[in-house]
Image (tube, rainbow, N blue to C red):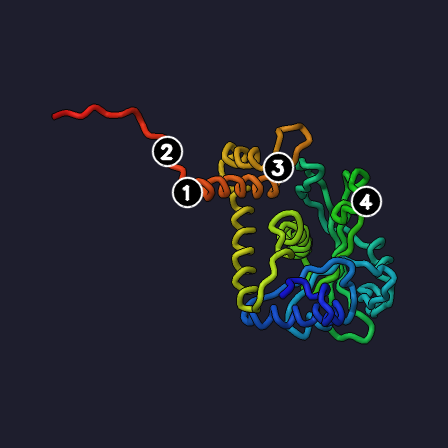
Amino acid sequence: MRWFSYQTPDFVSQNRHLRRALRTTRALFPQHALCFVLDGVRDDQKVFRWVREVKADFIVTVAHEERVVEVWNTRLSRRETVSIGELMHLVLWQGTFQAQFQRAGRQEQRTLRLGWFRVRLPGEDEPLSLVVVEHLHAAEEADDDDEEGERLVGLLTRRPVTTLRQAQQVYADWRLRGQIEHGYRLAQEAGLNIEHLLVRSLETMQRLFGFLLWAILFLFRALRRWPRPVVRWFQHWGGKLGRKHDRSGLYWLLWGLTKVWQALAIGPALGLQPAPGPPQPTYG
């Protein structure tokens, strides 16, 4: 049984599996408040409907600035239609705040400002919030594929946003998507290589996946909570050479722990025993 169904002949479409994933998540957590954080690829009205079906919230990166929405004009007391892109450039900024970003292995602080609108999609009764975030500094140094480095970012959400605190929370929750991506790459690619593990039943897959999640959480906790000398020691055994441009992330720690565990397992398997001490004199 493979972990990623798009590699099998019975794969139908990503949309079908995405909708099933939303329903399955709600079935697993029936009493929890759910919020799905989506990238611009999922900026799609049918996805919005699927999230609404499972009674959850969403935060999605605006990818279609040309989309027309209805916004309330307080001065004229009427609804007007305008594109999201126009709103993003006409927003009235409500406040600024500081946020930490990691770039090229180092932490840097940036200043951002926020504004928002309450909007509605044409033909829809449910209001949405459009949160607009602008990076005031360091955007010109961001990598081309660094979504957080874009100078102006729009976020659509089902959450009601009427205060600066609520807007900041939407942005903070949206930024968690980056950590989810790191965990996904660690699980699938050069880290734990879950894609190479084939199992024969769904029950085995569930147990293995639960163990994998535990391992990922263990690594994240160790990186943040263990004393730095201990973490650096394991990273050294994982291949970190101490060069100026070396990163200090999860992969070095994972590989170092793997080598130490392998060494501890090989010793008993080979029947290695501690070297005996000098012979002791006997009496009588």
Q: Is residue 226 above or below residue 199?
A: above
Q: Which residue is mark 2?
A: 274
Q: Quadrant of residue 237?
A: top right
State the mark number for residue 232. Answer: none
Task: Locate the N terminus by quadrant.
Answer: bottom right
Residue at image location 47% in from the left, 42% down from the top: 266
- What is the CA distance from the residue labelled 4 to the residue labelled 2? 56 Å
- What is the CA distance from the residue labelled 1 to the residue labelled 3? 31 Å
Q: Which residue is mark 4?
A: 144
Q: Residues within 10 Å of mark 2 (few under 14, many from 20)?
A: few
Of marks 4 and 2, which one's residue comes earlier in the chain? 4
Q: Which residue is mark 1?
A: 268
Q: Nearer the viewer, mark 2 or mark 3?
A: 2
Q: Residues within 10 Å of mark 3 (few under 14, many from 20)?
A: some
Q: Is residue 202 above or below residue 175?
A: below
Of marks 4 and 1, which one's residue comes earlier in the chain? 4
Q: Secondary structure at mark 4?
A: loop
Tell which residue pokes out farthest to the front in this image: 284
Kind of residue at disc 4: Asp
- What is the CA distance from the residue labelled 2 to the residue labelled 1? 11 Å
Marks 1,3: beta carbons within 8 A: no
Q: Quadrant of residue 129?
A: bottom right
Q: Residues within 10 Å of mark 4 (few under 14, many from 20)?
A: few
Q: Nearer the viewer, mark 4 or mark 1?
A: 1
Q: Is 116 on the left or on the right of 252, as rendered?
A: right
State the mark number for residue 248. Answer: 3
